[in-house]
Image (cartoon, rainbow, N blue to C red):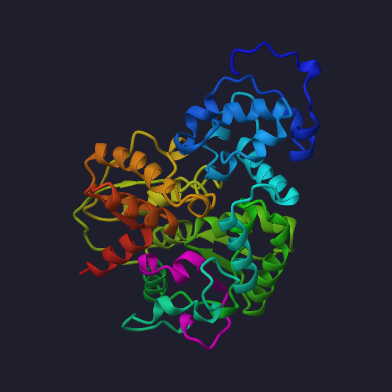
Amino acid sequence: MGTEVIDLATLDRTLAREVTPEWEQLLSCIQCGTCSASCPTAFAMDYTPRQLWQMVRLGMKGDILSSRTFWLCTTCKSCQVRCPRGIPIADTMIALKEYATRVDVNVPEGMKMFGETIATSHNISGDDNKNRQIWSQNLAHIPRGVKPRRRKAEVLYFIGCVSSFYPRVYSIPQAFVQIMERAEVEFTTLGGDEWCCGYPFHIAGMGDRMAKLAQHNVQKARAVGAKKVVFTCPSCYYTWTHLYPELVDISGIQLQHASEFLADLLAGDELALGSVEEVVTYHDPCDLGRKSEVYDAPREVIARIPGLEFREMSASRENALCCGGGGDVEVADHSVPTGVAAQRLAQVQDTGAKYVLSACQQCKRTLQEGARQNKIRVRAMDLTELVLKSMQAAP
């Protein structure tokens, strides 16, 4: 297919128009293959991204809809930042999911069930949403901002579904609330009133179902008097900053990722830190880095930890490899994220670091599982956990 001589004047552009408003940009693809070379899940796709764009240009609707290529896109935007034509590739992958969902053709059954789970349970796990604070139950001391009785505060910690319901990463919200309490930050949480931010809907091609979640969450944030909402989840942070403004009025509310919040606390010398004698590297989460351009704050936090030796990976910042945990790919094919994580962990090993830090609960979860499955002796740790460890080591 790549060697055919194509007469652009004869192409069926109907499909491109139906799929995305940026269809003219899609037709400008020069078939250089940069997107395919950049894609962390290309190894598992039936067509590479480059091939898929040519198929869209040719109007090969049946072949495209039967493909699993766009369902295996992690939406990491690695391809998009490298495309020489500036084509919104990851956005088009989401648009293809939306199109397949709209015409109801070959949508993975797991994805349909996933959508219904979020709609009915208001979280991605299907648990009773009243149990969103279950992660706090084994804390020796539960901070006031986490206790069942909601109280008003200008800082709201929006926890997210994964940290709320997946035991492997309970340690992230546990660490963050302890840090805030030690720093005497007056904060609150929403408990069962917190709903999924809606990002899983967006990347599953069900973005039209987000509005209800967005309106609910912002209304609840205003009800507790929040002037600032802080997130340990980069996906929630990205959703509130980039997607919510199109759906609901968020004026008057400042949004910060936990890494930015911690960097501010450390800059003001509000946290007493002790030495942590370890060699670490840092993995940029896609939703925090490439998609939100937050690169410096996590590194500023790391630089503040006494005794730490930091070694940057060969691919970092906008060039960082995806961990494999995004894009709802785990729902489409649970085996793919482990293979992607192995690629990233190989770069971690090259640094000689004992710990790979990140600032995302899904990155920690995916890298941790990747290390276990691939028998790689590296430990994944969230930035909040590192800061708490340093605080606990303070004299």
Task: Give coordinates of residue 306: x percent, y percent.
Answer: 24, 55
Horizontally, is 389 left or right of 343 in the view? left
| Image point (57%, 31%), residue name | 49
Q: Nearer the viewer, residue 238 or 132?
A: 132
Viewer can see residue 145: yes
Horizontally, is 111 left or right of 243 in the view? left
Q: Nearer the viewer, residue 265 or 374?
A: 374
Compared to residue 290, the image places residue 112 above or below, namely: below
Viewer can see residue 20: no
Quarter-of-image position of residue 215: bottom right
Look at the image and tell me in which quarter the N terminus lies: top right
Compared to residue 184, the image places residue 299 above or below, namely: above
Magenta-highlighted residues: 145-171
Task: Give coordinates of residue 31: x percent, y percent.
Answer: 60, 20
Task: Give coordinates of residue 87: x percent, y percent.
Answer: 65, 31
Q: Nearer the viewer, residue 363 or 293?
A: 363
